[in-house]
């Protein structure tokens, strides 16, 4: 049987569970190709995302490509190779660069960050936090690497790396294939733990192969993080379209104290059960039953930010 050695260790039920899971891998460089290879052999379905083509310099560390693949799209070549390894799994591939418009493509049971693009990492972090999807950040440069599991309710990528303005790249500083292979192995090992609901690593892991140094760094959730704290707030409030279909509203399971809100925000208009206020330069209708309606605003992040301020001050 294909998974017999793995199944003897994790059990048949867990193997069947793995076969039903889908992991999205963003970036098919050294980390992404190795992680996708290991997950394929473990029986996990995949979503592969990369917009780049293979060149000769990739072959030093991207171990599922050959010289015949040069100038092919990475996601297509990866899919073709991986299906030859395991034809029983499902693989979707996209030759695209992730952005706000197509980020939904990564919706899955788990997302692996294997990109070297900081902007895309922040995008993945925000989407995964908002949709309660676990994801695993991984990075490698020269002979150093790191990995960090990011799960709903825990510290997110933004908590740790908010102040970073740019990222070091392999093409500038170089990288050994030994560190990328090691980091990918850890990433996939953590993936299997998370997919099977096992205990996973809660610390940030950093590895230095020059010194053979393995560090575990405790990470504290930033209570002021505008990404994961807004998402925690979002779990308690429902963002929905009003019956008119023209306005967005947020509603909580509690009444609002209109008198307190009048003192905090001032009012444009009021009646017994409703206030019209201006918050953050936006007109907002507040109802005593807990509903907050936005007359013009369509930016969901800003809506949640304003709504949180209103609920916090009621």
Image (spheres, rainbow, N blue to C red):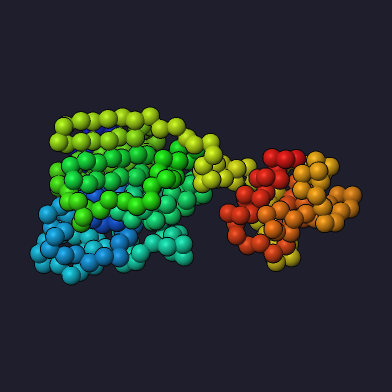
Q: In front here: 259 or 148?
A: 259
Q: In front here: 268 or 84?
A: 268
Residue displayed at 34% across by 66% down: 96
Question: In terms of image quadrants, where is residue 58?
Answer: bottom left
Q: Check the image and name the residue furthest to the bottom.
A: 71
Judge left or right: residue 194 versus residue 1.
right
Residue displayed at 70% across by 59% down: 282
Residue displayed at 65% across by 45% down: 308
Is residue 52 placed above or below 311 in the rendered structure?
Answer: below
Residue 181 in sight: no
Number of numbered tags placed on the structure image: 0
Judge left or right: residue 258 versus residue 200.
right
Q: Position of residue 41 (x, y in %)?
A: 22, 48
Question: In terms of image quadrants, where is residue 87?
Answer: bottom left
Q: Quadrant of the N terminus?
A: top left
Residue displayed at 18% across by 42% down: 143
Q: Position of residue 124 (x, y in %)?
A: 42, 52
Is residue 299 placed above or below 215 in the rendered structure?
Answer: below
Q: Quadrant of the C terminus?
A: top right
Q: In front here: 29 or 40?
A: 29
Question: In terms of image quadrants, where is residue 144?
Answer: top left
Q: Position of residue 132 (x, y in %)?
A: 49, 45
Residue 57 in sight: yes
Q: Position of residue 169 (x, y in %)?
A: 25, 53
Q: Check the image and name the residue furthest to the left.
A: 67
């Amino acid at each position: 049987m294909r998974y017999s050695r793995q199944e003897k260790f994790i059990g048949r039920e867990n193997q069947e569970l793995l076969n039903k899971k889908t992991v999205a891998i963003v970036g098919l460089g050294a980390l992404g190709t190795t992680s996708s290879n290991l997950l394929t052999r473990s029986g996990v379905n995949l979503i592969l995302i990369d917009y780049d083509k293979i060149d000769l310099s990739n072959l030093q560390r991207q171990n599922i490509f050959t010289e015949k693949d040069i100038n092919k799209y990475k996601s297509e070549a990866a899919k073709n190779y991986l299906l030859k390894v395991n034809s029983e799994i499902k693989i979707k591939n996209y030759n695209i660069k992730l952005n706000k418009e197509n980020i939904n493509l990564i919706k899955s049971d788990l997302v692996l960050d294997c990109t070297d693009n900081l902007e895309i990492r922040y995008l993945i972090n925000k989407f995964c936090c908002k949709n309660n999807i676990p994801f695993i950040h991984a990075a490698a440069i020269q002979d150093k690497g790191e990995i960090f599991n990011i799960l709903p309710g825990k510290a997110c990528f933004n908590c740790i790396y908010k102040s970073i303005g740019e990222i070091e790249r392999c093409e500038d500083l170089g990288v050994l294939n030994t560190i990328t292979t090691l980091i990918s192995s850890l990433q996939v090992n953590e993936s299997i733990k998370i997919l099977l609901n096992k205990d996973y690593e809660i610390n940030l892991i950093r590895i230095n192969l020059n010194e053979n140094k393995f560090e575990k760094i405790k990470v504290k959730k930033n209570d002021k993080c505008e990404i994961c704290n807004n998402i925690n707030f979002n779990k308690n409030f429902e963002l929905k379209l009003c019956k008119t279909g023209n306005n967005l509203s947020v509603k909580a399971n509690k009444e609002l104290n209109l008198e307190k809100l009048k003192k905090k925000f001032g009012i444009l208009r009021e009646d017994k059960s409703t206030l019209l206020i201006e918050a953050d330069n936006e007109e907002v209708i507040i109802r005593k039953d807990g509903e907050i309606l936005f007359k013009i605003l369509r930016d969901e992040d800003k809506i949640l930010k304003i709504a949180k301020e209103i609920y916090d001050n009621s």
